[in-house]
Image (cartoon, helix red, strand yellow):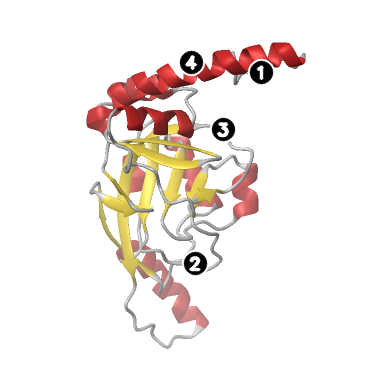
Amino acid sequence: MSVQENLELIEKFKRLRVTDVRDGMDWMGYHHYGTVDYHIRPLFRPETSIIGIARTARYIPYEGPVPALSPEEYTKWVKMYYSEICYDPWGKDIQSGDFICLDIAGLDVGLLGSNNTLACKKRGCVGFMTNGGGIRDTDECVIQGIHVWSKHISQPMDQARIRYVEKDIPVAIGGVAVYPGDVVVADGDGVIVVPRKVAVDVAKYAWQEASGDKAARKQLYIDLGMQLDNTVE
């Protein structure tokens, strides 16, 4: 999957809402697939539609035991932990338009924070999704415009809590299998994942429904004397 191919696919979904894409999935017979569990919510509202290409990784609980260390020894141990146990090789692979999808086994751990998410944004990442907590430093993340959908917010750091396993593999998040290269659309209504093999057709039928909705609402705006906005134009 080249960056150009990914960006061209993202363009087909530009300005579509999650609900529009849900309709497109229905038109393709995927009525019971793609919608991520409603407990996985955006970090902040209002939220505009974020569209990207899935880049995946999986983490599991760290089994321990945690060594008995002095604070000075612990500082050294933490450096080892981040280089050998809980690291993020997927971060170095990010391409423009990537949407990072992390299976963290539902853990309450701050795998993502204001620093590493900003570094990912610099490389071209458009958003993040996890099936647990996985996000902390949230006040800063909101200011920085970091788009995250997660089950909850976490305070704890990674060490002695989580272990990296693998990347670029199918992961399960919110009852949906997410494959590398799938299209991920997220907004205030949650997240939907579109299998890449049907993405072009899903976009086609999503636009079919979205266009009718926009036209009808635009006329209602006019009838009500409301100022037109980008949701109806």
Q: Which residue is mark 3?
A: 48
Where disc 1 sits, the SS reads: loop
Q: Are marks 2 and 4 in contact (CB under 8 Å)?
A: no
Q: How many neighbours does mark 3 have within 10 angstroms: few (below 14), some (14-19), or many (20 or more)?
A: few
| Percent position of residue 141, x then y | 59, 48
Q: CA distance from mark 3 to mark 2?
A: 29 Å
Mark 2 or mark 4, earlier in chain: 2
Q: Which residue is mark 4?
A: 211
Q: Residue furthest right?
A: 225
Query: Label 3 to label 4, Cα distance in Å?
Result: 18 Å
Up-down: is 206 above or below 150? Answer: above
Circle on res. 157: 2
Q: Which of the two discs, 3 and 1, labels the residue nearer the N terminus? A: 3
Residue at 60% x, 21% y: name it.
Answer: 231
Q: Visible in this render: residue 3?
A: no
Amino acid type assigned to the residue bearing label 2 in the image? Met
- Residue with the mark numbered 1: 229
